[in-house]
Image (cartoon, coloured by chain):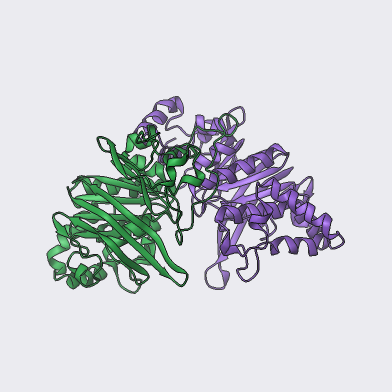
Amino acid sequence: MLSLNRVSKFYKIGTFGGKELAAVRDVSFDVNRGEVVSLIGESGSGKTTIGKMVLKLIEISRGSITFDGTDVAGIKGGAVKSYYREVQGVFQDPFSSYNPIFKADRVFTMIRSEYYPEMSRSDWDAKVETALAGVSLEPDQVLNKYPHQLSGGQLQRLLVARALLLDLKFLVADEIISMLDASTRIDVLNLLAELKDRGMGILFITHDLSLGNYISQKTVILRRGVVVEMGATDKVFGNPTHPYTKVLISSVPQLHKKWAEVEAEIQAHGGDHDGVCLYHEAYPPTGQAGDGPGDRPAMVKVEDDHFVGCFDLGQGICKA
Amino acid sequence: MSLQVTDLRVYYRTLAGDVKALDGATFSIADKEIMGLAGESGCGKSTLGNSLIRLDGRMKYIGGSVNLDGNELPIWDQTGMNEFRFKQVSVIPQYAMSAMNPTRKIGKMIGELVESRGISYEEIKSELDRRVDLVGLDEDVLNRYPMELSGGMKQRMVMVISTLLDPSLLIADEVTSALDVSTQRAVAETLVSFRDHGFVKSMIVITHDVSILYQTADTILIMYAGKLAEKAPTKTIIEKPLHPYTRMLISSLPEVGVRYETKKLVGIPGSPPSLLNPPTGCRFRARCPLAFAKCAEEPPFIKIANDHEVACWKATGSDA
């Protein structure tokens, strides 16, 4: 339903915007109905930038994003409103997403005045109740309260409920559980999985590999704005191929395995791919210009539903 | 016995009354022990850490004693603590990224710091260089400003500064939380190496991330709502926890390898009680699936096996 086709984003930096910084370069992937795709990267990898482009909060520099066949960049005027009826985002910090002066349920009222001005009071209340039930919140616990009276998990679920009031088809969840406590974060995570089961497409942006692994069907690993590895989650995590993915997975603190054990495991598993760049295997450098896709990102298929793009990004990782 | 804390109580003064953030903590840390301190936000873990080094204006010392290497720490006395601060007890603050003076070159700032403790910069320079090298930084960083360093570099620099005077006890408060996974691992491993090199005798590592503790800590202390819940060697806490809160907390953590499709994790229903007016008896009672009549009495934090202390009537076998 959502499709990114070679999307790039350049920011102008320096005095008078004389320099360009590529935050995202040629990123392509799809998110289908009833699918959670996790976008994993460290800080500065461009993961939030991609989320913002999907939500039309910033412009796309190059490439295109299509939602159900419509080019997102071309949506203008009144059509923007109907786009937001179907596509919504929830962000990292639930405490700063609310205006502390107003009660938290004002976010619902604003949806009503914007999208459902004609709806009767009782119909609206029923709608709110359904949305709250959808995120397992009790109406009397959260309505009529100020943001500071609610917990982070409650606030975050209210924001998801707000999105559910619309005819939501696609949700961008940008680090929505990083600020929550261990005992509540899993509930919000399960909530996303339930929404997915109901047919929603979710772009789950995170830096936490274990969360991405838990919830998503597809994983996209970003490094400095470039996709280095993507595919079915079990394949990316089960058989990490790009050196960067290996580093990431071996650095995740685990509960029953020490770092050294994980590293040894991945080393042993790496087998024949270890140290050899698949990009170079697919496009051996012959010294002539014009062979292979040059410096453009090209994903090489390692197995079904598992693609790796390995480039020498200046760290001497690539040995070929 | 390096550190012995007995019935320590520290409250926060607010207009609404005292918030009982730390309500009776008794535990000890052995020489060479790295103790992890974990719990949800607001459980009092940072209050415990801070109270061992500096009580800020809002914090009120109520009672209890802290004994470090045979000396009583006058933690209620701001000026009296000066003698111990940084020499006996030191801290790596939660936001080490912004802990350094931005207007001074790092070397000069360290010079000013050690001179305030009556030690000349020249005297300590060679040791400083050795340690900067040890944490994997270039000697040249001392001639640079903090803004020229990345987050992980700053974090490691602050770690070197905090331990320069070889304190007996080091408190590391959420030092890995704001870092990317690969940097997180480097920082956590540096912490352990500080203990191994004898720069610090014992350490309290405060974090909400139990999996980081599994990688670094020898023992783990779990706190809940201002009280100690359970303390045991790391392996016991992760594999055979006795307190229902610890059990639910550990089982709600997503790990690499755990998927929503195959194993659905559950959170802990409810939320922690307000510490303004905490309930009597066991504070976890309202959320605990095992709660029974006896829980209306407060369970003592007692030793049930070698190195294993727990505050739960069920775990201590008082089922009657």
How far across and down, in percent of the image, does residue A150 sit?
58, 59
* Chain shaded purple: A
Residue occupying the point 50% across, 41% down: A209
Query: Horizontal placement of A231 versus A224: left or right?
Result: right
Given residues B226 and A58, the one toward you in this image is B226
**Image coords of residue B261 (percent x, y):** 60, 31
Can residue B71 be seen in this snapshot? yes
Q: Nearer the viewer, residue B224 or B253?
A: B224
Please tell me which residue lies in front, A205 or B148.
Answer: A205
Q: Quadrant of residue B95?
A: bottom left
Up-down: is B186 above or below A254? below
- In which quadrant will I find the C terminus of chain B? top left
Chain identifier of the green chain: B
Give left or right: position of B286 versus A299: left
Q: Is residue A203 left or right of residue A271?
A: right
Residue A81, percent from left and from top:
79, 59
What residue sits 59% from the left and 46% below the top? Answer: A188
Residue drawn where x is 16% and y is 63% of the image: B125
Residue at image coords 71%, 53%: A163
Q: Is residue B127 left or right of residue A173?
A: left
**Image-quadrant location for residue B122:** bottom left
